[in-house]
Image (cartoon, rainbow, N blue to C red):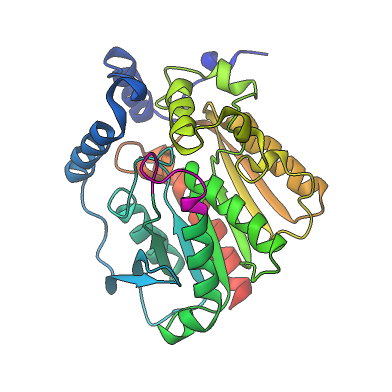
């Protein structure tokens, strides 16, 4: 069987994007730090084409701790609600970095989307981000969300480190007696902050996300190395995954995080949690925000949106 590095990318545009990154990889995250990474991301977002027009978009603070969020309403439909948790190694990423993705998600599913501006490391290490996400989900599925004209059945969705937060929020809500979201959608999630799965080594560099940058992000969010193996940080190590919401887990072939995402999907299924699991062949980490670069990445995102639409249809 060929090594992952010998396998083709999904289209020529994605191959050109990855090759450009290999020729000019830029400095590693640990060499520049969070502030510079955020500035660089802001420039990338500003250079990206704007997202599609949507009926109503507005920022609001929600929950018992006044977490900043952005609500997208594509139509009069307000239920179910997708609570979206952005990726970015727990240190970068914000409402703007995933604004285009959330607009596409809302329009393609005709569902309200609430994007969460949770606190980031290193200024706010674990468990601050989990606390914020749990607070927002609780608000959304109880009277707070209803009073704001949204709420009801709630799907939690996250990409990369946001997928980690979505999984951790579901575990905590289960352990604390709820309320649980109706489903969880995890896109190429971090589930093992010890970085022990093989794809962290076989896909370590040259595929857009470098394993050492993931390690740096984990260090910022969870400074104590011993704690990174705890299930309240690395959900793949949870002793019991029973009683969690139905899940969609999507991983990418050329991704350092591929194997830990695949493993989490398998463990959920073994615990009798209904799981839809798909590994996107020829795809890289972060494809949800690569739709303007690669038609294949856009198509992979559309398949995720179809998963969401199917869930939403069953919840209405």
Residue 243 pos. (x, y %): 77, 60
In the depicted structure, whether residue 133 falls above or below residue 163: below
Above or below for 279 versus 176: above
* Relative image position of residue 265 (x, y in whole percent): 69, 43
At x 42%, y 45%, the residue is 288
What x and y, as percent, mark residue 174?
70, 62
The answer to which image quadrant residue 85 occupies is bottom left
**Placement of the N terminus among the 4 image quadrants:** top right
Residues in magenta, as a range: 120-130
In the image, 180: left or right of 15?
Answer: right
Residue projecting furthest to the bottom: 147
- Count the marks: 0
Residue lying at 58% horizontally and 78% vertically, measured from the top left: 316
Q: Magenta segment: does it hold 126? A: yes
Residue nearer the viewer, 218 or 78: 218
Front position in the image: 146 or 194? 194
Identify which residue is drawn at 57% across, 28% down: 225
Q: Main secondary structure of the magenta part?
A: loop
Q: Is residue 92 magenta?
A: no
Residue 93 percent across, percent down from the top left:
34, 45
> What residue sits 26% from the left and 38% below the top?
38
Q: Is residue 271 left or right of residue 67?
A: right
Q: Is residue 50 visible?
A: yes
Report whether residue 73 is seen.
no
Looking at the image, residue 108 lies above or below residue 14:
below
Can you tell which quarter of the image residue 307 is in?
Answer: bottom right
> Relative to 195, is 37 on the left or the right?
left
Say which of 124 and 175 sits in front.
Answer: 124
């Amino acid at each position: 069987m060929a090594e992952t590095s010998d396998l083709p990318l999904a289209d020529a545009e994605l191959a050109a994007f990855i090759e450009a990154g290999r020729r000019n990889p830029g400095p590693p995250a640990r060499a520049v730090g969070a502030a510079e990474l955020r500035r660089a991301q802001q420039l990338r977002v500003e250079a990206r084409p704007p997202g599609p027009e949507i009926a109503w978009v507005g920022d609001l603070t929600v929950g018992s701790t006044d977490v900043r969020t952005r609500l997208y309403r594509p139509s009069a439909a307000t239920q179910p609600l997708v609570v979206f948790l952005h990726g970015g190694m727990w240190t970068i990423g914000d409402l703007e970095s995933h604004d285009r993705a959330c607009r596409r998600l809302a329009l393609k599913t005709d569902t309200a989307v609430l994007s969460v501006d949770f606190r980031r490391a290193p200024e706010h290490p674990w468990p601050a981000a989990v606390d914020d996400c749990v607070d927002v989900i609780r608000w959304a599925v109880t009277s707070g969300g209803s009073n704001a004209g949204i709420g009801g059945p709630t799907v939690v969705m996250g990409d990369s480190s946001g997928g980690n937060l979505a999984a951790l929020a579901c575990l905590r809500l289960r352990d604390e007696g709820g309320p649980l979201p109706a489903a969880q959608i995890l896109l190429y999630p971090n589930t093992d902050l010890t970085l022990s799965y093989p794809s962290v080594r076989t896909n370590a560099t040259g595929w857009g996300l470098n394993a050492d940058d993931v390690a740096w992000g984990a260090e910022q969010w969870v400074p104590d190395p011993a704690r990174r193996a705890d299930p309240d940080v690395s959900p793949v190590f949870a002793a019991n995954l029973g009683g969690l919401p139905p899940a969609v887990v999507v991983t990418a072939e050329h991704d350092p995080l591929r194997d830990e995402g695949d493993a989490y999907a398998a463990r959920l299924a073994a615990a009798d949690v209904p799981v839809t699991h798909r590994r996107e062949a020829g795809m890289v980490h972060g494809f949800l925000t690569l739709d303007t670069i690669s038609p294949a990445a856009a198509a992979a995102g559309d398949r995720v949106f179809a998963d969401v639409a199917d869930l939403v249809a069953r919840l209405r």
